[in-house]
């Protein structure tokens, strides 16, 4: 399954301690992920400028249809949530917004371990620490630590297309020259951005817990539970 919350043994955390199954999720800033994905898909030998114009056209077309970036739900919703049917009177934005709230709720309820591409080294330290507490033997723990030690302290590689010189960063830089378009782009990604911003906060709390040696006791805070209550989850 594509989603990370499909395991039948995964039990939500309602503030009574961490669930037996811990889910790990690695997220990335939505604009960066969108551009990176389009670069990966493209095969023709476009320039940076041509690639940027193609992305502008695609996003403007999507927004013209009232659409929002929503690929993240493929991973963060449970199969039951993904199969939910919505009242036809609701707008596309209403549905996308509710799915964003459900996704955030899942990150909390399942007490997911969150990694972020933009803070790759921190993420590897969190995962290495978590794996060290999950493994059941000295040998397995050593193997887990060896696996993560290859990445700790290293910068995540930049996405570069098969066409030399065209990177995600170079295309984003070109897009940022068009302020009118960037307002459309921000609107397009705003619900995924809401999820990623919340996940980044979780990530930072987890990293701080690792540094203080309290990660094994990391669980939902009262403010997190209040958030779930406020959105009716």
Image: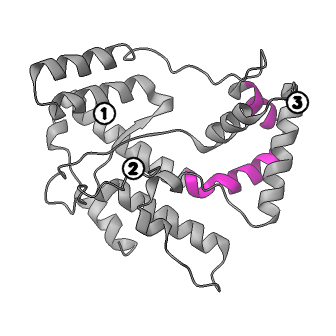
Identified at 25% across, 60% down, the residue is: 12
Which segment did they paint magenta?
Answer: 170-192
Q: Position of residue 172 (x, y in %)?
A: 73, 33
Q: Mark 1 sits on what residue? A: 207
Q: Position of residue 96 (x, y in %)?
A: 58, 66
Q: Position of residue 56 (x, y in %)?
A: 83, 45
Q: Main secondary structure of the magenta part?
A: helix
Residue 49 has which mark?
3
Separation of residues labelled 1 and 3 (CA atoms): 38 Å
* Circle 1 SS class: helix
Q: Is residue 213 visible?
A: no
Contact flag, marks 2 and 3 (Cβ < 8 Å) = no
Mark 1 vs mark 2: which is more N-terminal? 2
Mark 1 vs mark 3: which is more N-terminal? 3
Q: Quadrant of the C terminus?
A: bottom left
Membership of 36 in magenta stretch:
no
Residue 4 has which mark?
2
Q: Residues within 10 Å of mark 3 (few under 14, many from 20)?
A: some
Mark 2 vs mark 3: which is more N-terminal? 2
Side of 91 relative to 227 (left or right) = right
* Circle 3 SS class: helix
Membership of 173 in magenta stretch:
yes
Side of 141 relative to 151 (left or right) = left
Identified at 67% across, 59% down, the residue is: 68
Identified at 64% across, 84% down, the residue is: 88
Out of 140 and 205, give the one closest to the viewer. Answer: 140
Contact flag, marks 1 and 3 (Cβ < 8 Å) = no
Question: Taking 198 as reference, is 232 above or below it?
Answer: below
* Circle 2 SS class: loop
């Amino acid at each position: 399954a594509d989603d990370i919350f499909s395991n039948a043994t995964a039990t939500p955390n309602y503030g009574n301690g961490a669930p037996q199954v811990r889910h790990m999720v690695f997220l990335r800033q939505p604009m960066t992920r969108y551009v990176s994905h389009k670069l990966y898909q493209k095969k023709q030998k476009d320039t940076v400028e041509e690639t940027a114009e193609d992305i502008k056209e695609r996003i403007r077309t999507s927004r013209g249809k009232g659409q929002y970036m929503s690929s993240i739900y493929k991973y963060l919703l449970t199969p039951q949530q993904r199969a939910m049917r919505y009242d036809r009177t609701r707008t596309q934005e209403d549905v996308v917004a509710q799915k964003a709230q459900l996704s955030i709720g899942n990150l909390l309820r399942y007490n997911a371990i969150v990694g972020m591409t933009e803070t790759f080294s921190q993420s590897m330290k969190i995962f290495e620490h978590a794996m060290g507490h999950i493994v059941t033997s000295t040998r397995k723990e050593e193997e887990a630590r060896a696996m993560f030690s290859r990445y700790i302290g290293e910068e995540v590689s930049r996405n570069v297309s098969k066409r030399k010189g065209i990177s995600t960063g170079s295309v984003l830089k070109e897009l940022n020259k068009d302020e009118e378009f960037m307002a459309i782009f921000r609107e397009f990604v705003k619900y995924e951005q809401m999820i990623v911003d919340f996940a980044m906060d979780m990530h930072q709390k987890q990293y701080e817990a690792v540094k203080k040696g309290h990660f094994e006791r990391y669980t939902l805070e009262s403010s997190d539970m209040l958030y779930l209550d406020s959105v009716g989850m």
